[in-house]
Amino acid sequence: MQTDIDPRSLIGRKAFDRNGTKIGTVDEVYLDDATGVPEWAAVRTGLFSRDAFVPLEPSELVDDTLRVPFERSLIKDAPDFGVGRHLSPEQELQLYHHYGLDVSAPASAPDRDFGRLAGDND
């Protein structure tokens, strides 16, 4: 998804699944703690329903709507963590696994530069 889009502009947009079936309306957007890039959207799935978290990558904006490349049934079955609160790393991991998204590469790379200043070669 475009990383230069204002996450607030996603709120209120309609969201559709891979088949063009309406999922609901974007209720909230969650940013990555480290980068500030929009990472998850909470989509209100119905009038008396709950919000379902959907990954913003590999979703895309098409004609002012959010197109999520997953089936509506998979989205509706996503883990329910409630909205309005921070997602923990464990909750994000559950969501990545639910959607079958690969998170092994970033998670397996050790952070050897933690606590060092850039350009410090000692």
Image (cartoon, rainbow, N blue to C red):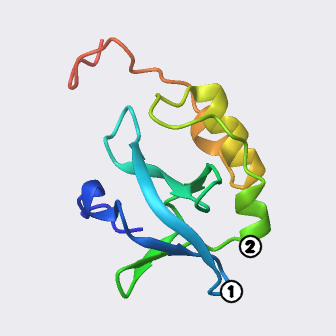
From this view, report whether residue 85 is shown above or below residue 50. Answer: above
For the residues labelled 1 and 2, say whether their Cβ atoms are less than 8 Å apart. Answer: yes
In depth, the one of 76 and 118 nearer the eye is: 76
Rendered image quadrant of residue 2: bottom left
Rendered image quadrant of residue 120: top left
Seen in the image, is 101 located left or right of residue 5?
right
Q: Is residue 120 visible?
A: yes
Separation of disc 1 and disc 2 at Cα?
7 Å
| Amino acid type, mark 1 | Asn
| Amino acid type, mark 2 | Glu
Q: Is mark 2 on a helix, strand or loop?
A: loop
**Could you say where residue 20 lies in the image, as x and y percent from the top left?**
62, 87
From this view, report whether residue 41 is shown above or below residue 109. Answer: below
| The C terminus - image quarter | top left
Seen in the image, is 45 located left or right of residue 38?
right
Seen in the image, is 7 located left or right of residue 104?
left
Residue pointed to by mark 2? 71
**Could you say where residue 69 lies in the image, as x and y percent from the top left?**
63, 74
**Could you say where residue 34 lies in the image, as x and y percent from the top left?**
37, 33
Name the mark on residue 19: 1
Q: Is residue 108 visible?
A: no
Q: Which residue is located at x 37 percent, y 88 percent? A: 63
